[in-house]
Image (cartoon, rainbow, N blue to C red):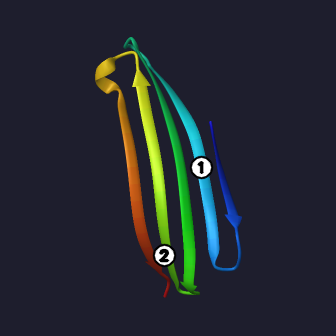
């Protein structure tokens, strides 16, 4: 289950937000996992062919097997060029 939303603030700046949840039941094993993800991204168009961006993503997985639990935070800077 999830959602993605994009919003153009003006002709140069675009904001993106996303969130979703994944539930997994493993057949033949007594294991159930649930993963929650959330992300924010901002893009700036320097030129029609050059876009810069900053993105933050947070993920958290919980399981009835504690060895499979984790939390992850990612911050990403990007530059994209179109020929």
Q: Nearer the viewer, residue 55 or 64?
A: 55
Q: Is residue 54 above or below residue 19?
A: below
Picture quadrant of residue 15: bottom right
Tell me the distance, in whole angstroms, between the alpha carbons under discs 1 and 2.
19 Å
In the image, what residue occupies the spot 42% across and 70% down?
78
SS of the residue under disc 1: strand
SS of the residue under disc 2: strand
Q: How many marks?
A: 2
Q: Identify the mark nearer the N-term, 1 or 2.
A: 1
In the image, what residue occupies the spot 47% across and 65% down?
54
Residue 52 badge: 2
Residue 22 position, x and y percent, is 53, 32
Q: Quadrant of the N terminus?
A: top right
User: Residue at label 1?
Assistant: 18
In the image, what residue occupies the spot 46% across and 77% down?
80
Residue 13 position, x and y percent, is 63, 73
**Crowding at mark 1 (Cα within 10 Å: few <14, some 14-19, many 20+):** some
Residue 26 position, x and y percent, is 42, 20
Residue 8 position, x and y percent, is 70, 69
Badge 1 vs badge 2, beta-carbon distance below 8 Å = no
Is 62 placed left or right of 7 in the picture?
left
Residue at the outermost left position:
67
Q: Nearer the viewer, residue 22 or 55?
A: 55
Q: Is residue 80 above or below residue 1?
A: below
**Crowding at mark 2 (Cα within 10 Å: few <14, some 14-19, many 20+):** some
């Amino acid at each position: 289950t999830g959602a993605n939303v994009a919003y153009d603030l003006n002709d140069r700046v675009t904001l993106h937000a996303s969130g979703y949840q994944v539930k997994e039941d493993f057949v033949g094993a007594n294991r159930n996992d649930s993963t929650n993800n959330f992300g924010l991204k901002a893009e700036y168009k320097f030129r029609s062919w050059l876009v810069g961006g900053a993105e933050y993503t947070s993920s958290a997985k919980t399981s009835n097997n504690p060895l499979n639990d984790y939390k992850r935070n990612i911050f990403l800077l990007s530059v994209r060029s179109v020929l």
